[in-house]
């Protein structure tokens, strides 16, 4: 991606140096990808014949603002037998309220298919 | 039924290693069939109001979760009808036809159902799969991945072996653990070792899905691969995931800027007892379609852990390669198996890999066991550390880039030392553990963990717990490296973190070259359209491929010969014809006593001549050493010597060791006795030839000497040397007459 690159924190990546790390001036958020960068990568993926990869990057862009714990927790909620359809729909609502509309859609779809295929919590 | 011992030919065949492998009678009801299972559906696709309502013979109300995810996300509806209408044979032919571009093929393939792709690819034979792989892989430049693990999760050995693997050219390193809780320590050690070995080497630590993601979030690994997909819903669920959870996981990795690919592979469903009477290949087509649907940039497949299951059925090995090509058809990164060892037979395992090696893939091995078999915690790989030189020789033989390069011994020793020093410093700085010097010295020198006696088996576990408890991230590792003088490695680790910010390595088939350039579908697309197109190694890379450490030049051989000069061989005069009936001339070749001093058997030329002389003496004859300067042909040397010989009998000896007995009345190319296989001729045999020459001189008919028999590849071992030695002999040929020599 041309031009300056910013980490999730907004810090310009050129400011991330070994020296700055030594000084303790750098956090993991400074070396995390920015949602706008993922949106750009989605455009690149689409232009290179892979709309599904693009869709993944757009879902990912939505997840950048969620904490590691939330992301790991939502992943667990989607594993088989962990959630009722209602649980999944509630998460979809929470995601939507965070602006994560694509992920919300994924959870709604899961609620529907899991209920039909017996993959919900018993 | 009585059992009887088979006849010898079959007893012998039964003992061969290939017969340790299991071969299955196809059992379609168990999924033990490569292609065309009884439940494999015919391809079909019905789109109603912009929605897929039937796919591969199944109505949407009957879609299982895999069908549903593929139908919702995985098929490009804009090209689907066009693509599904193409005859499978027609489409199969396009895969090998340079007139059809890769771009157009991947465009159409994105509208095909799993059953359609399975049908298309089952039509390609082995040679066609090689062409299709050459043409269809996403990245132009091939590459390779290594396993770096050991039995004790020894951080020093992990780092040394990671640096070594990077030195040999591997661009991805995969580690895993025998003890699950050790994982964070392994991730740190391998990341440090990789950074010592080369810039831009990607590192993963294969553990449980959530744990692996957590390591990635801390920056301790730079990609993930062990995200498993299965072709039937039941087995998918048994794997504790669904297509939706895997899709979310895929996005989770991307959200942290971490490269990932999924893993599948024919035979896994049969192995887990849930193939639903489908063929391995059709089930794999579902996995590959799902991989694309969930937005993974790539797939590791080709059997993987179940490669031996596919290998047990007819056509199974071909189906493994077809799986890889299918990934490429879906426009995804192909990490092409050749991973878990699928045969005890060196012939079979080479045969299984070779077409892929020639065709070229994003990663030829999805885990070349760069370490000892016993240290491979994934289980022994299809290729292991004992095969690295074989692989390099194969690259050179075929002019093929398999991703590896020769590494210099001194450089690897230096890297291993630096890797252990770096890990020692980082672990100490971060309070993860202390290593002693003996342990470090052993790790530098070790061929494997069995060579290490000074290790502390509890250290990795303690280190791993401390990493978790004190929340060590890659930023801390970088600080520790920099604080201890490992500035280069600190910068390389930081560059891998910064790559996450740019995200370019999230694109399909991305690796870094050694200048941290991303090579991917986007930046290094494979555009193959027949001979002279597609990937061509740069001259520099070709030189790496061609130059293996074992190669020797004529100049190397000349200086090696000079190191064997122990005795003085000097000219004493012009050789005259003798009339003494006891006189037997030993005619030697032009380079004798000049440039060639040792025979191919390792015996010095002087000693060989000495034995001939002693043998003649035993028979009461007198040997005379004469150099024949005007020919290097052994027959002519022998005949010329015989014509000088008072007895009319001679011994001819080329300096490389080939020897014969000649007589003056014979034709030049005839002889009485011949040692043709110089490398096998011992001191005793030269003595025996001297004795026999003496007996011939006395008119007797001795029992002829015989070449010792060897079933070794003598020619492979020595023919290159022979070419050089003959070239040296030729430079010594001159028009001078025969000269008598003395050895002192």
Image (tube, coloured by chain):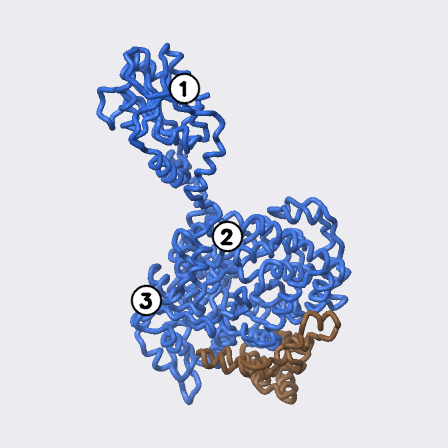
Chain colours: A brown, B blue
B678 vs B236, left or right, is: left
Q: Residues within 10 Å of mark 2 (few under 14, many from 20)?
A: some
Residue B172 sits above or below residue B581 on the image: below
**Camera sees residue A78:** no
**Closer to the N terminus: mark 2 or mark 3?**
2
Report which residue position mark 2 lands on: B406
Q: Can you say whether B26 is above or below A15 in the image?
A: above
SS for tag 2?
loop
Q: Are marks 1 and 2 on the same chain?
A: yes
Estimate the x, y position of residue B355 in percent, counting from the top left: 39, 57
Q: Which of the numbered marks, if any, corresponds to residue B687?
A: 1
Question: Which sits earlier in the primary sequence, circle 1 or circle 2?
Answer: 2
User: Which of marks 1 and 3 precedes in the sequence?
Assistant: 3
Query: Label 2 lies in what chain?
Result: B
**Disc 3 target residue:** B530
* Percent coordinates x, y for residue B397 in the rendering: 39, 51
| Mark 3 chain | B
- The residue depicted at 30 percent of the width and 22 percent of the height is B641
């Amino acid at each position: 991606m041309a031009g300056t690159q910013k980490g999730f924190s907004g810090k310009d990546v050129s400011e991330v140096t070994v020296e700055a790390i030594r000084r303790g001036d750098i956090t993991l958020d400074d070396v995390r990808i920015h949602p706008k960068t993922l949106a750009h990568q989605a455009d690149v993926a689409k232009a290179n014949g892979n709309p599904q990869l693009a869709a993944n990057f757009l879902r990912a862009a939505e997840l950048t603002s969620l904490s590691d714990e939330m992301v790991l927790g939502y992943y667990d909620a989607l594993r088989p037998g962990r959630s009722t359809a209602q649980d999944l729909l509630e998460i979809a609502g929470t995601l939507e309220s965070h602006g994560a509309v694509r992920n919300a859609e994924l959870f709604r779809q899961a609620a529907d298919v899991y209920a039909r295929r017996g993959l919900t919590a018993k | 039924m009585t059992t009887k011992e088979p006849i010898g030919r079959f007893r012998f065949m039964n003992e061969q290693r290939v017969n340790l492998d299991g071969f299955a009678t196809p059992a379609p009801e168990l999924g033990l069939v490569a292609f065309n299972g009884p439940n494999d559906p015919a391809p079909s696709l019905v789109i109603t109001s912009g929605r897929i309502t039937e796919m591969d013979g199944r109505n949407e109300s009957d879609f299982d979760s895999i069908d549903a995810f593929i139908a919702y996300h995985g098929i490009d509806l804009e090209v689907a009808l066009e693509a599904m209408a193409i005859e499978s044979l027609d489409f199969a032919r396009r895969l090998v036809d340079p007139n059809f571009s890769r771009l157009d093929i991947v465009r159409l393939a994105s509208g095909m159902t799993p059953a359609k792709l399975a049908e298309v690819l089952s039509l390609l034979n082995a040679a066609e799969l090689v062409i299709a792989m050459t043409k269809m892989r996403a990245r132009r430049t091939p590459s390779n991945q290594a396993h770096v693990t050991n039995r004790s999760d020894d951080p020093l050995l992990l780092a040394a072996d990671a640096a070594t693997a990077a030195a040999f050219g591997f661009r991805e390193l995969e580690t895993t653990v025998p003890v699950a809780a050790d994982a964070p320590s392994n991730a740190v050690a391998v990341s440090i070792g990789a950074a010592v070995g080369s810039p831009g080497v990607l590192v993963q630590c294969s553990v449980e899905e959530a744990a692996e993601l957590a390591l990635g979030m801390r920056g301790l690994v730079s990609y993930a691969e062990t995200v498993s997909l299965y072709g039937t819903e039941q087995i998918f669920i048994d794997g504790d995931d669904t297509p939706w959870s895997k899709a979310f996981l895929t996005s989770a990795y991307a959200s942290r800027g971490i490269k990932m690919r999924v893993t599948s592979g024919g035979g896994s469903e049969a192995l887990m007892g849930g193939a639903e009477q489908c063929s391995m290949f059709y089930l794999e087509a579902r996995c590959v379609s799902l991989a694309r649907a969930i937005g993974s940039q790539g797939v590791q497949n080709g059997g993987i852990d179940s490669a031996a299951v596919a290998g047990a059925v007819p056509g199974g090995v071909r189906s493994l390669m077809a799986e890889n090509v299918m990934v490429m058809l879906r426009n995804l990164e192909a990490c092409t198996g050749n991973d878990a060892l699928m045969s005890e037979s060196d012939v079979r395992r080479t045969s299984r890999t070779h077409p892929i090696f020639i065709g070229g893939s994003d990663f030829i091995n999805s885990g070349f066991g760069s370490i000892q078999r016993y240290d491979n915690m994934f289980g022994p790989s299809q290729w292991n550390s004992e095969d690295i030189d074989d692989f390099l020789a194969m690259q050179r033989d075929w002019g093929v880039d398999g991703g590896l390069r020769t590494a210099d011994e001194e450089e690897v020793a230096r890297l291993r030392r630096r890797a252990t020093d770096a890990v020692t410093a980082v672990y100490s700085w971060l309070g993860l553990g202390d290593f002693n010097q003996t342990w470090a010295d052993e790790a530098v020198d070790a061929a494997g963990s069995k060579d290490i006696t000074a290790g502390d088996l509890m250290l990795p576990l303690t280190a791993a717990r401390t990493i978790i408890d004190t929340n060590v991230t890659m930023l801390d590792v970088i600080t520790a490296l920099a604080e201890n003088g490992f500035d280069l490695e600190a910068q390389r680790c930081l560059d891998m973190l910064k790559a996450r910010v740019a995200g370019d390595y999230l694109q399909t088939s991305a690796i870094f070259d050694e200048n941290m350039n991303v090579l991917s579908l986007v930046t290094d697309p494979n555009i193959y359209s027949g001979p002279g197109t597609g990937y061509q190694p740069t001259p520099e890379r070709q030189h790496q491929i061609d130059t293996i450490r074992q190669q020797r030049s004529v100049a190397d051989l000349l200086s090696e010969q000079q190191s064997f000069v122990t005795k003085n061989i000097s000219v004493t005069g012009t050789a005259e014809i003798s009339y003494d009936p006891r006189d037997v001339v030993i005619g030697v070749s032009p380079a004798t006593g000049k440039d060639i001093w040792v025979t191919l058997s390792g015996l010095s030329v002087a000693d060989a001549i000495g034995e001939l002389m002693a043998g003649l003496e035993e028979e009461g004859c007198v040997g005379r050493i004469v150099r024949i300067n005007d020919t290097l042909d052994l027959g002519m040397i022998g005949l010329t010597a015989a014509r000088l010989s008072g007895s009319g009998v001679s011994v001819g000896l080329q300096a490389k060791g080939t020897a014969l007995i000649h007589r003056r009345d014979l034709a030049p190319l005839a002889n009485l006795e011949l040692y043709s296989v110089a490398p096998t001729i011992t001191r005793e045999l030269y003595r025996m030839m001297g004795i026999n020459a003496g007996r011939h001189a006395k008119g007797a008919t001795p029992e002829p000497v015989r070449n010792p028999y060897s079933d070794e590849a003598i020619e492979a071992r020595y023919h290159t040397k022979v070419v050089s030695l003959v070239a040296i002999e030729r430079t010594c040929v001159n028009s001078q007459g025969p000269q008598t020599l003395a050895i002192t």
